Amino acid sequence: MAETIVVLKSPDLAAAFAEEVRAAGLTIEPFPGLPRHLRVPGVAAAAFPFRAHPSVQAVDDGDEELTPCFQELVLEQNMRGTGGWSAARVIRRRNPWWTPGGGALPFPRTSTFNAKRTGAGVDIFIIDSGVEYTHPEFGGRVNQYWHYRSNYAKAELDASGHGSHCLGLALGRTVGIAREARGHSMKFYDAHSGASVTNAVAAMGAILSQYNTQADDDRPAVMFMSWSDFSSTIDAAVTDMINAGIVCCYPAGNEATDITASVIRPAESDPDTIVCGGLAPDDTPYYTPESGYGTNWSLTDVDILAPAQRTLSAQRASEGGGYRLGNGTSYATPIVAGVVACMLQGYRRLTTRAQVQAVKQKLLDNATTGALKPRRKITSPYDWFQLPDRIVYLDPNIEFEVIPGLVPRNP
């Protein structure tokens, strides 16, 4: 069924605008948690008679299907020795699996991860295919409380396995970064219903509603979305989340393409999001020549790099349970989100964009530099991956990190 999503320039305009729309014989409904967003069922965006109204910032077709979550899986037996290089890389300035000269160290290689910060007291939100929260990696710390359609609750917990892999990298007890953070899964599609713009916007509204209604819990939050395709109304919802104090991360994408030249989102989106590019185990850009998949790049639009190739994380029971390996900037993004959660440990809830900006700047300032090695595509066109020389880093030896503008729980 056709429907239009409308974003207004200000929430103060909603009541008068809704009255005009209803006077024209149309139905209009709010999105809980997003006071600037409205839904008009039964009419496509192109035919919506108020699209040029002076109160309107953007309109989208709500039933437009978003690209499903990207997955490039790797056979686990291809990762000899110990797995989990991604967490091991994050807490080290030097690559634990490769020599400074570029040679691979012999197996078994270290996957040791020890950090004094665990993300305790911080919430991580994921909008994805769902999460199999019964997996041992999650240890009772993950809730899946929101489904756009009621039958989602009756379907399998994770529609594709993508969400479980992602959240495991963010907060899993043995493969993740923020190993005591609390997780909240927003399942916005399943095997029978696509990932529509309406579902995505509604999921963001649900996050904002929870963040605002649980303000007394005084927990900072980070949100990540590891899927392709965005829209103007999704961008507006991200802006509202950042304005409310939620740190937002998402992937650069996996088409091995120059973001700026191709005008691919998230390059067009809010400048205060954290855009995550992909890193291979040898500190080169993530790229799989056999498939042609690899990190999208841009010196100006990609903010930071994180492990994205052969990442080890949780696997659904329907796929055999245990663990699997996967490639993609989908997996770099939750690693960065986990690092941010650890950085926020010990702080009170964020409430302003300026605080989100301070967290992003601290993340970039902390990054490892001088380790990224150049890499060139071996398929036409023979482009070099142009990426910022910033690999995500979490200092494992400190318990609290000073971030200007944030309020400590115990000053």
Image: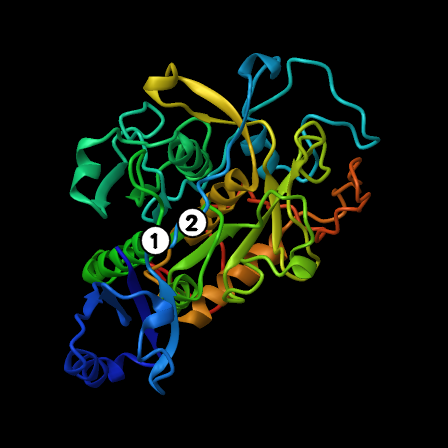
Q: Badge 2 local density, few (<14 within 10 Å), some, or many (20+)? A: some
Q: Residue at x 46, y 45 (%)?
A: 67
Describe residue 89's horizontal placement relative to residue 179 as left or right.
Answer: right
Instruction: Where is residue 255? Give x, y as percent.
Output: 63, 44
What element does badge 2 sit on?
loop
Please name the amino acid that badge 1 sits on.
Ala
Please name the amino acid that badge 2 sits on.
Leu
Look at the numbered discs 1 and 2 and tell me whether their residues touch, using CB distance below 8 Å: yes
Instruction: Where is residue 31? Give x, y as percent.
Output: 23, 64
106 relative to 232, above or below: above
State the quadrant of the N terminus: bottom left
Instruction: Where is residue 247? Give x, y as percent.
Output: 43, 58
- Quadrant housing residue 168: top left
Q: Residue at x 70, y 60 (%)?
A: 261
333 relative to 270, above or below: above
Q: Residue at x 70, y 27 (%)?
A: 290
- Numbered mark located on residue 391 in the image: none
Which of 366/338 is in front?
A: 338
Describe residue 331's horizontal placement relative to residue 321 as left or right.
Answer: right
List the residue tagged with mark 1: 200
Tell me which label, 1 or 2, sits earlier in the chain. Answer: 2
- Quadrant housing residue 51: bottom left
Report the mark closest to the observer, 1 or 2. Answer: 2
List the residue tagged with mark 2: 66
Q: Badge 1 local density, few (<14 within 10 Å), some, or many (20+)? A: many
Describe residue 78's horizontal placement relative to residue 52 as left or right.
Answer: right
84 relative to 2, above or below: above
